[in-house]
Amino acid sequence: MIKLNVCPSTLAQGFDSYSPIALKMLFDGKKVSPFLPFPSPSAEQIEAKEALQNIGRISLSGVQPKFSMLIGEDLRLYYARANEQGTYILKPRPNAYHLFHKDFCAANEHLTMQIAAQVYRLETAPNGLCFFKNDEAAYITRRFDVRSDGGKYQQEDFASLLGYTRTNGGSDFKYCNGSYEECAEVIHKHVKAAPVSLLNFFRLIVFNFITLNNDAHLKNFSLINIRNEYRLAPGYDLINTSLHLTLPRIFALDKGLFKEGMSFSDIHSVQRKDFEEFGKRINLPEKLIERELNRFAGEYPLTKELIESSFLSQDLKRQYELSMNYRRKLLAK
């Protein structure tokens, strides 16, 4: 069994399990173990297959398998069965042939989400890592669309809100249609407190840029209906894709920031002025845009601390830090 010396959620030093803060955020204070009592789905073992045989439908988004999870009476996570409403999503190691460093996808997503929450104070889904019996790491996140009474909040991703499906938009509909400016128009249309959600959306777009997340497609942003009012859902699926892809892009959406699109040369020379223009187009005040871009361009010791405490390999930690520093400097005045 893997031995821990940092919290596998907050990455705070000196913990051999989830810290009290992590337990409160992720599990309502329940002392849930980060160690799963079964091997990973990728393990060629009878025990792994038996653990999976009674679960409900497994969803597969792109190359990332996702499992619905619940907390058992023994305070261990288990796969939700067909008739159970899961309250957590588990993302184990992907198996796609074209990904580099697949063993560290979970650690990468976890680190990126923690930087978003702790350094930049973005609203994100509570998350952490847990470990299969064969020590393989998996990413776990609490579902924000499930109510405390077991019901679900209405949630619509931006592909649906913009009217794009595989039928009318092609196999890559979530990438090749729409722009982030058009997503902002959706927020204007459906969200009563639009200025708040627009600022949060702007922050997510800039954060994705500095952390090299080029998988921020239309289905990775959502509006959620809470108490009969729509708002931008917390950030989810944040990951530095440059660690795993051979040909990383700048933006997930082909059009990039603007509804008229951005040329190939534009996308490869993205700078502060582009985000200033984007902020103006979505009706953010100029002083607010300047403040936010200065914040994301700044250097914070906590970022380095989180990277060093993460579960990435030493080489990937270095790559993560260097790539993020390069992108931050592109936002400097």
Image (cartoon, rainbow, N blue to C red):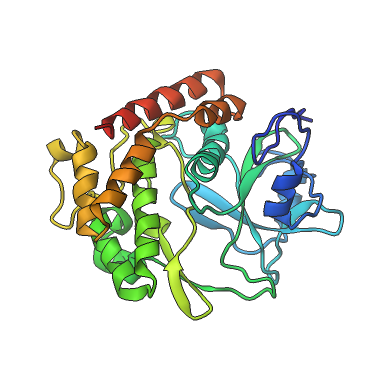
Q: Is residue 308 above or below residue 158?
A: above
Quadrant of image for the N terminus: top right
All told, the count of numbered labels is: 0
- On screen, residue 118 versus residue 150, left or right, reads left
Q: Nearer the viewer, residue 30 or 101?
A: 30
Residue that lies at the very extreme toward the right in this rendered image: 74
Hey, which residue is sitting farthest bottom in the picture?
228
Report the residue at 43% width, 30% height from top: 243
Q: Is residue 142 left or right of residue 134?
A: left
| Pick the front one: 248 or 194 | 194
Residue 26 appears in the rendering: yes
Q: Residue reaching furthest front? A: 287
Q: Quadrant of residue 5?
A: top right
Give how far across and how far down residue 68 sits, in percent: 64, 59
Q: Is residue 44 left or right of residue 195?
A: right
Residue 222 in the image: above or below residue 214:
below
* Residue in front for this viewpoint, 275 or 94: 275
Q: Quadrant of the C terminus?
A: top left
Q: In the image, residue 125 lies at what x, y percent? A: 56, 54
- The quarter of the displayed image where residue 159 is located: bottom left
Q: Residue at x 87, y 54 (%)?
A: 74
Say if residue 255 shows up in the picture.
no
Question: Residue 219: where, in percent of width, then height?
Answer: 39, 59
Q: Position of residue 65 (x, y in %)?
A: 54, 50
At 27% across and 57% down in the image, what residue appears? 284
